[in-house]
Image (cartoon, rainbow, N blue to C red):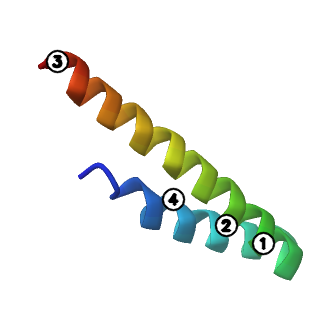
């Protein structure tokens, strides 16, 4: 569950960026989705560790 946001946000950012800005938008969207997925995954892992 902790790494699930990575592929979901990567692909959704890629598709949204492709629809909005073509090839360059797809690159920016994929990068943004990947960064957001890493942040959310890190937040999830930190919150699970904090509860123990």
Pointer 2 or 3: first along the chain: 2
Q: Residue 23 falls in which quadrant of the image?
A: bottom right
Q: Is residue 43 above or below residue 52?
A: below
Q: Which of disc 4 and disc 3 is earlier in sequence? A: 4
Query: Element type at marker 2?
Result: helix
Looking at the picture, how far across and down is residue 31, in whole percent?
70, 61
- Residue at image point 62% right, 50% down: 35
Residue 16: image x %, image y %?
67, 66
Q: Residues within 10 Å of mark 1 (few under 14, many from 20)?
A: some
Check disc 4 and report the residue beneath it: 9
Q: Residue at x 74, y 76 (%)?
A: 18
Q: CA distance from mark 4 to mark 2?
A: 8 Å
Q: Residues within 10 Å of mark 2 (few under 14, many from 20)?
A: many
The residue labelled by disc 2 is: 30
Q: Earlier in the sequence, mark 4 or mark 2?
A: 4
Pointer 1 residue = 27
Q: Residues within 10 Å of mark 4 (few under 14, many from 20)?
A: many
Residue 19 in the image: above or below residue 2? below
From the image, which quarter does the C terminus lie in? top left
Tell me if label 2 and label 1 are in contact, CB under 8 Å.
Answer: yes
Residue tagged 3:
51
Q: How many marks?
A: 4
For label 3, the SS is: helix
């Amino acid at each position: 569950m902790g790494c699930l946001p990575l592929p979901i946000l990567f692909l959704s950012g890629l598709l949204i960026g492709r629809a909005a800005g073509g090839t360059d938008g797809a690159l920016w969207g994929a990068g943004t989705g990947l960064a957001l997925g890493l942040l959310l995954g890190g937040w999830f892992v930190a919150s699970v560790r904090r509860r123990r």
